[in-house]
Image (spheres, rainbow, N blue to C red):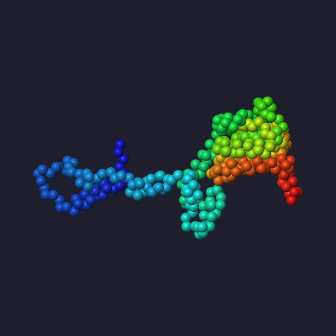
Amino acid sequence: MSVVTAQEVRSIVAAVLAELSAAEAAPPPPPSSSQPSPSSPPHSSPSPEIATAKPQPPKEAPAGGSSSTGGEVSIDVSDPTVPHERHRIGVENPANPSGLENLAASTSARLAVGRAGPRPPTRAVLLFGADHAVTQDAIFGDVPTAILEELGLFTVQTKVTSQDEFLLRPDLGRMLDDEAKKLIAERCVKKPQVQIVVGDGLSAAAVTNNLPQIYPVIEQGLQGAGLSLGTPFFVRYCRVGAMNDINDIIEADVVALLIGERPGLGVADALSVYSGWRPTAGKTDTHRDVICMITQNGGTNPLEAGAFVVEHVKTVIKAQASGMELRQAQIGDR
């Protein structure tokens, strides 16, 4: 079934009105014996304007917006996730345009998105939805087995049994299950100077996107510094506190945990490296250090971050302290 456009409808209506106006202005026809009776329907040929009316091709809407030109509506919008759209100022006629641009450029937060009446504009809503979808993929995704195998990492698991439980029970993500403890005890070197552990945390994308770049830098840098390394492995459903359970088995001087950060709306693949001097049961965040926001999407490049991790581990070993104890030792040195 063909679709009649608004332009065609207007053309038809105009032709009918023109025909009716001409009929009213014309004198009545003289009586004729051949004229049909009042009960007979009149027969008339269609108006030339109506007969020749042709569908008009739809006019293309301007990119990135909607248009009602010619009565047709286009809902095409530009991709809101491309850099120039993500950072576009949406406030109309700002009092200080340059100041607003500088403020928006200083952060990845959603500033100056503008509004459509009391609501955000369509572009901002679409960008929010796109970013939210990316965070969902990061949280509920899995690290590809091929990446772990390429780096020689075997896999263990915490007491968490599903992704939903991982989100609802952070405490279980801090404790290894019995099978994990057994595997670590059997396969890992004991009492190394540095034990490297990789955990998925709250972003599998962080591990997937950054581990192939940062891991070799850390491993080679620590070996080049003459430090002994333990047997690396991967922990599924991992929280930071799992460092304590891990080191109660391995007894390393330093544990370095590479783990996915909580994704934000805009950056969902940021990696963190937590480290601690001889972590054990009862140690908390005050005893740990962290290097965060390791990502090529607005954070520290993983290659550069890997070199920084190596230098930090050397500092921890020299001071034999981490966290607040390391800060206090550094203050005392001054």
Q: From this viewpoint, which residue is outermost toward the right?
A: 332
Give the residue displayed 74% in from the left and 42% down from the top.
Answer: 219
Tell me what residue is drawn at x 65 percent, y 47 percent.
Answer: 269
Q: Where is residue 327 in the image (x, y as percent from the top left)?
A: 84, 54
Q: Which residue is drawn at 76% across and 41% down?
A: 196
Percent from the top left, x then y, of residue 59? 39, 55
Q: Where is residue 102 in the image (x, y as percent from the top left)?
A: 63, 64
Q: Which residue lies furthest to the left in this view?
A: 33
Q: Which of 268 and 196 lies nearest the eye of the viewer? A: 196
| Residue 89 position (above or below residue 302) | below
Indicate the position of residue 212 as horizontal and vertical percent values.
67, 42
Q: In this view, does 236 lie to the left or right of 99?
A: right
Residue 236 falls in image quadrant: top right
How many marks on residues? 0
Vertical arrangement, residue 68 with respect to residue 206, above or below: below
Query: Which residue is at the front of the view, 35 or 257?
Result: 257
Residue 240 visible: no
The C terminus, quarter of image: bottom right
On the rendered structure, is 324 left or right of 126?
Answer: right
Compare residues 220 and 282 and report the one nearer the observer: 220
Q: Where's the N terminus, which quadrant?
A: top left
Residue 77 visible? The answer is yes
Q: Relative to residue 152, is residue 113 depicted above or below? A: below
Task: Specify the quadrant of the image occupied by residue 105.
Answer: bottom right
